[in-house]
Image (cartoon, rainbow, N blue to C red):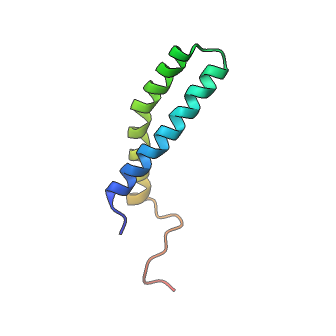
Amino acid sequence: MIQVKRHIAKSITYRIFGSAITVLLSYSAGLTIQWASYVGIAELLIKPIIYFIHERVWYKWIKFGVKNNYEN
């Protein structure tokens, strides 16, 4: 059984990594480090919620690629 806390931990680590990349890309695209950080913070606050909902929908309703323990 997969617990909800696993989904939460995956969401947090995924967002930290993703936001760091967003800040670096924003900075390399010409934004100041301050504005690149603002973009990263905004993304950090919004996207974990979106990811968590997406993960739970897949877990609860989408059975693509999931085998039942009773199948051979």
Q: Which image quarter: residue 70?
A: bottom left
Q: Position of residue 15 (x, y in %)?
A: 47, 39
Q: Whole-percent x and y of residue 18?
A: 53, 37
Q: How many marks?
A: 0
Left/right placement of residue 65 relative to residue 59 reads right
The single residue placed furthest to the right in the displayed view is: 29
Q: Is residue 30 left or right of residue 38?
A: right
Furthest residue in direction bottom, as rendered: 72
- What residue is drawn where x is 63% and y is 27%? 25
Image coordinates of residue 20 in percent, x first then y, are 54, 33
Q: Quadrant of the N terminus?
A: bottom left
In the image, residue 36 above or below residue 5: above
Q: Horizontal and vertical percent for residue 65?
A: 54, 67
Would you identify the image quadrant in which residue 46 lies?
A: top left
In the current view of this chain or complex, which residue is farthest to the left? 4
Residue depicted at 47% across the width and 64% down the height: 63
At 58% across and 13% down in the image, what residue appears? 32
